Amino acid sequence: MGMRRHAQFLARTVMVSNNNLGKAARLLNSILSKEGIFEQYRYTRYYEKPTQTRRRINYERCKAIYSEDMNRKIKFILRKNRMDPYPGAS
């Protein structure tokens, strides 16, 4: 009853079937790593100097911009309704 009232636990609840705790633990670890909980825990576990924080945030911004640009280029190349499927390759 107590866990149902807290919305923060809904997406991270793992049901254990057939007493298989190993599989449930792996599933929970994968959910937490996809959501970025482990990274957030690592950043708040110890004190991070302000210069390190700025460097990390700038790196994350650059990585997000690069990934977005690369995904846009990949989607453009993989489109199927283009006249020339390989532009510039002829």
Image (spheres, grey):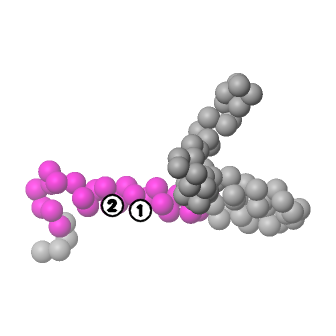
In the visual, does 68 lie left or right of 64?
left
Which of 59 and 89 lies nearest the eye of the viewer? 59
Residue carrying label 1:
70
Please report the residue visible at 62 percent of the width from the left and 35 percent of the height from the top: 10
**Is residue 76 on the magenta stretch?**
yes
Location of residue 5 (image quadrant): top right
Please report the residue visible at 61 percent of the width from the left and 55 percent of the height from the top: 21
Location of residue 9 (image quadrant): top right
Can you tell which mark lies on residue 27? Answer: none
Q: The N terminus appears in which quarter of the rendering?
A: top right
Q: Is residue 6 visible?
A: no
- Label 1 element class: helix
Amino acid type indicated by mark 2 = Ile
Magenta segment boundaries in residue numbering:
61-86
Can you tell which mark lies on residue 74? Answer: 2
Image coordinates of residue 55 in percent, x first then y, are 73, 66
Q: Residues within 10 Å of mark 1 (few under 14, many from 20)?
A: few
- Label 2 element class: helix
